Amino acid sequence: MATEPLLDFDWDPMDTGTGIPFDVYARLRREQPISKTREGAWFIACQADLIAATKEVDVFRASMREPGVVVPPEEMLISEIPEPRHGQVRKIVNSAVAAHRLGRVEDFTRDLAHQLFDRAIAKSEGGDFVELVKEVVMPVPTSVIAVLLGAPVEDYALWGSWSDEVVQGDYPRFNRNERGEGLAGAHPEFTAYVDAMIAARRADPDPPMDFTTRLLQTEIDGVRLSDVELRTVLIFLLLSGNETTRHLLSNLLHRLATTDGLLETLRDRPELIPNAVEESLRLDSVIINLVRTVVRDSVFRGHAMQEGERVFFGVASANRDESIYEAPEEFRLDRPKPKGHAAFGGGPHVCPGASLARLEGRIVLEVAVERLSALSLEPGFTWEKVPVFWANGPSRLPARLVAR
Ligand code: HEM
């Protein structure tokens, strides 16, 4: 068995604030695909190793929590719940975002995208720059997930700001913040809102048959979810449906604005739009790293890992693995297996919202291509990443839009 030579250079996988270290990833893939930082965290850099690791759920447990932070089972996010309960909760979540339910949201998403572009084009034609992230992108995932879950669509801005607060705050790591403990203590407005949605359905003799109602009535092993579990599932769905898809949409519009000829190519050959979505997911990987904790001493691909050690699954690195992708740094619409990337993870925790995210990406791109003859960013624009270590998307995209 290999004993671990520590890397001869210092780097911190969580330090993505000044940019994603693609040069470090490339070196690791070449020299040490499974490595250990000087701080003692493992980093998995290649795609095959990463996908294999996502399947080892009894060795690698998802957790963003700091060591020693204990979360009551009812408040565990779905990605942290151990098997077999995870599989049971997962069935419920899968049914919420199942492909057959997505037909309903397709027309809604298209209408919304047209309205947002209507407004953005008018503003741009009036001479102002349009901040695409805020004015076009953000309303899409929050509204779409609200429609699926049965929350009032007009509250999308509330969801958006609450989910930002959670993701950018201390709660995911410490299970608390300066306001209090647990979700209810740390984010009281968000939890009160979701609790009210649950209470309204419980009080209604004929509740609307949306996801929230179904969730209330579903049994796992003959037992229904408690109100706290219901709240946790709903909040996590709102967060995961929002914070990730937002960056996919922003990254797509950024590519459209900065890649010569892309708008014209997609207009002439709209059948390539799904490939553009996949290539964005791969190259501009929305999730940079997934964080795991080793829950029992084990050997992974020849490397001895100790209980309690932290492991980073390098999704953004795996998506540029040169053993899989020719010219991995290039944005190409003709990759042989466009969906073969690791952007949605793998194993039992693979993203259940992948079809929904792809649908939103495809529709926003279709509408952009249909409505615009040109899209350009403010002169001197510099890319600034959102301040979340695991996420990759621009904080802002000030743009000029020209209608067709
Ligand atoms: C571009 C958009 C998205 C990306 C890149 C993405 C990526 C991922 C990844 C990599 C995972 C695996 C996490 C892990 O193994 O720890 C995941 C899990 C998850 N995603 Fe997504 N996701 C996206 C959109 C969505 C949407 C729209 C939803 C909701 C409808 C969603 C709901 C979830 C949930 C609930 C999980 C946890 C699954 C589990 O632990 O079993 N995601 N996502």
Image (tube, grey):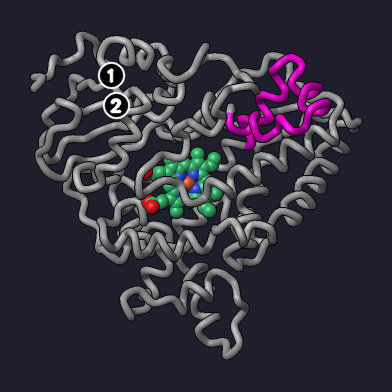
Q: Give the range drawn in magenta.
A: 249-278
Where, by quadrant of the figure, is residue 319 drawn? top left
Work out whether residue 92 or residue 52 is closer to the camera in this orientation and state it. 52
Q: What element carries label 1?
A: loop
Image coords of residue 383 (percent x, y)? 58, 21
The answer to whether residue 275 is magenta is: yes
The residue identified by callout 2 is 44
Q: Which residue is drawn at 65% across and 46% down?
A: 359
The answer to whether residue 258 is magenta is: yes
In the picture, measured across the screen, residue 284 lies left or right of residue 175, that is: right
Q: Residue at x 76, y 38 (%)?
A: 366
**If the image is split into quadrants, where does the N terminus sit?**
top left
Work out whether residue 190 or residue 376 is closer to the camera in this orientation and state it. 376
Where, by quadrant of the figure, is residue 271 drawn? top right
Whether residue 173 is situated above or below residue 23 in the rendered picture: below
Image coords of residue 14 (percent x, y)? 33, 28
